[in-house]
């Protein structure tokens, strides 16, 4: 009587395991690379979208801008260094660091319906707030500095005074808006209406704002965006 046996021998089992390992590495290697590539692409796309949103925020304030300032002409309760003595300066961290500038926009105050607010006995003076865009710890923020003069012509100011998130002050009604992280460059170039480059914001009627963000990985290039915009209104009369 003969006995039939079935199954793998030890040698056959080792061969199957080896071949399976090779096939698995061949299959999942490209899949892993594809997943990493897609994840990096998603991060880069999100980063670019955030950068464009930051540029649109600047564009929205320039639409209501009266002027670009070298220093803040409205008293900031806490200043750039969270004290009452330091003033904002367009050079930011200094002349030797053009990639960390400060943009100070003198912007007309509005109601929630985007209507201008006027001051003065004759209601002939447009109320002005200041918007300050600055980089701190590689993050782009916007601070709103509200004119503290009480409007004499009605209308509630929609803008609210903001301060750094760590600051508690009676004048702080909101915290600085965080617009973009991983900022490698925030530079502002100033121009006349005819396109002549200026060395300071004084007298400027147009700007080119450039933002660059660090790459999320070594394999994804850094993102850079530009905004060129001119002042639409230098004065506002009712």
Image (tube, rainbow, N blue to C red):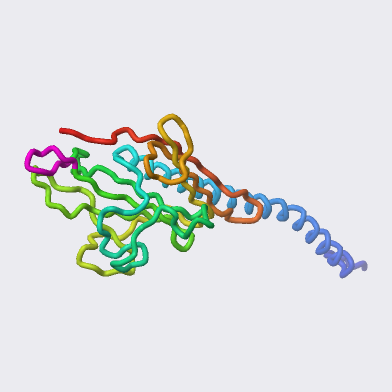
Helix, strand or loop: magenta stretch: loop
**Residue at 15 percent of width and 33 percent of height:** 238
Residue 204, image quadrant: top left
Quadrant of the image occupied by residue 65? top left
Q: Residue at x 46, y 39 (%)?
A: 227
**Residue pushed farthest top?**
194
Q: Nearer the viewer, residue 86 or 221?
A: 86
Q: Indicate yes or no whether the magenta region holds residue 118.
A: yes
Q: Quadrant of residue 112?
A: top left
Between 147 and 158, the one lying in front of the other is 147
**Count of numbered labels shown in the rendering:** 0
Estimate the x, y position of residue 75 in percent, counting from the top left: 25, 58
Return the residue found at the far left.
Answer: 121
Q: Is residue 209 above or below residue 176?
A: above
Residue 161's x, y, as percent?
24, 57
Horizontal arrangement in the rendering, residue 139 relative to residue 125 (left or right): right
- Which residue range is magenta in the image? 117-126
User: In the rendering, at what x and y percent does residue 3 appear?
Assistant: 89, 68
Horizontal placement of 26 versus 177: left or right?
right
Q: Please give the name of the residue rendered at 22% of the width and 35% of the height, measured from the top-left corner.
A: 236
Q: Is residue 204 above or below residue 31?
A: above
Q: Quadrant of the N terminus?
A: bottom right
Residue at the spot 52% in from the left edge and 56% down from the top edge: 97
Q: Is residue 111 magenta?
A: no
Q: Position of residue 149 (x, y in %)?
A: 15, 52
Q: In this picture, is 5 found above or below 224?
A: below
């Amino acid at each position: 009587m003969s006995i039939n046996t079935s199954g793998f021998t030890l040698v056959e089992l080792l061969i199957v395991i080896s071949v399976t390992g090779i096939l698995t590495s061949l299959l999942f290697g490209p899949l892993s690379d594809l997943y990493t590539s897609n994840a990096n692409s998603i991060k880069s796309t999100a980063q670019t979208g955030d950068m464009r949103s930051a540029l649109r925020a600047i564009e929205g304030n320039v639409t209501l801008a009266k002027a670009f300032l070298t220093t803040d002409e409205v008293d900031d309760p806490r200043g750039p260094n969270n004290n009452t003595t330091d003033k904002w300066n367009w050079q930011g961290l200094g002349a030797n660091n053009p990639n960390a500038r400060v943009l100070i926009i003198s912007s007309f105050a509005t109601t929630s319906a985007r209507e201008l607010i006027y001051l003065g006995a004759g209601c002939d003076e447009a109320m002005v707030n200041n918007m300050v865009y600055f980089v701190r710890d590689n993050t782009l923020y916007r601070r709103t500095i509200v004119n503290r003069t009480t409007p004499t012509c009605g209308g509630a100011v929609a803008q609210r005074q903001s301060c750094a998130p760590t600051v508690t002050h009676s004048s702080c009604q909101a915290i600085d808006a965080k617009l973009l992280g991983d900022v490698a460059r925030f530079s502002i170039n100033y121009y006349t209406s005819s396109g002549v480059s200026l060395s300071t914001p004084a007298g400027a009627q147009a700007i080119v704002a450039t933002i660059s963000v660090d790459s999320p990985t070594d394999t994804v290039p850094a993102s850079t965006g530009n905004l060129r915009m001119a002042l639409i209104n230098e004065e506002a009369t009712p």
